[in-house]
Amino acid sequence: MQIERREIIRELLGTKPFISLDELGRMFPDVSEMTLRRDIEYFEETGEAIKVRGGCRSVGFITAKPDDRVSERLKENVGTKRAIAKAAAEFLETGRSIFVDSGSTMRSFVEHVPGKRFSFTTTDPAVALELCKDGMSAVNMVGGRLESDNQTVTGLQATRFLSDINIDVAFLAPSGYSEESGFSVGNFNECELKRIVVDKAKVVVMLIDSSKFGKSLPYTFCTAENVDVIVTDSGVPETIVKHASLCGTKIVIADAPAEEKK
């Protein structure tokens, strides 16, 4: 019961800047105020909230740098993203349970999925619609709350769904990567989803263009040690290549033709 209650509170912290004790009391009428205060203290210890008079403030609304809107990211590094997506598609396997992340790079990725029978799960409605077009693949759409900026599904319902499925190969796209912070995003709920996927997947393939290297966003969902393959372009720093090698992570370089780079 405590775990479920705190998951609900965590989801709430991701959607609003302030939660009052009175509000929590109405949500959980059978829980004492002392227990709810301990819940707030728990989230303060995890760094997700700051205890204030009468409740708590969400750290995400104070410090989080939101990811750029998908509509903006779709216009950036188009040729490079296409090349990375095409190279990553080589790791698709029929007869496997495959997770496809959300975002602009993944929308390029689905263009390179061959017309074969796959079993996909995704958090991106646009990706799901594209994967359904040929009628060959089984496509599971994760349910939950649709984030307006990222156009990805998150929340407690989504994490429960992913916790109940098996994943053989996961194709993920971070918002940033540094050796110190690992692979990160700017949205806590999205971070939690990616973390579950990484934990469950037998093979993790990370798609990231070199413009994201050296960036550190507020929420880390995994490190290079958790990743089997990084598909990127030739702009990847040599220090990151060496670090990946030490972690046993394979680097695949995929560059777009000069005339297609943007």
Image (tube, rainbow, N blue to C red):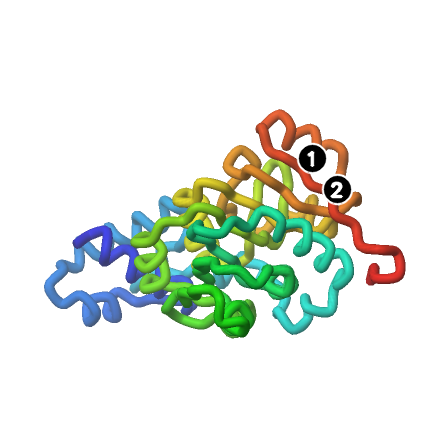
- Decide which of 244, 229 is in the foreground and name it: 229
Q: Would you identify the image quadrant in which residue 7 lies?
A: bottom left
Q: Secondary structure at mark 1?
A: helix
Q: Secondary structure at mark 2?
A: loop
Q: Would you identify the image quadrant in which residue 252 lies?
A: top right
Tell me the amino acid under the disc marked 1.
Answer: Ile
Q: Which residue is mark 1?
A: 240
Tell me the amino acid under the disc marked 2.
Answer: Val
**Rendered location of residue 51, percent (x, y):** 35, 55
**Rendered location of residue 212, percent (x, y):** 69, 51
- Decide which of 171, 139 is in the foreground and name it: 139
Q: Which residue is mark 2?
A: 236
The residue at the point 57 percent across, 63 percent down is 115
Q: Would you identify the image quadrant in which residue 71 lies?
A: bottom right
Disc 1 residue crowd, few under 14, some 14–19, many 20+, Cα 10 Å: some
The residue at the point 57 percent across, 36 percent down is 224
Picture disc at residue 128: none
Q: Is residue 65 above or below residue 228?
A: below
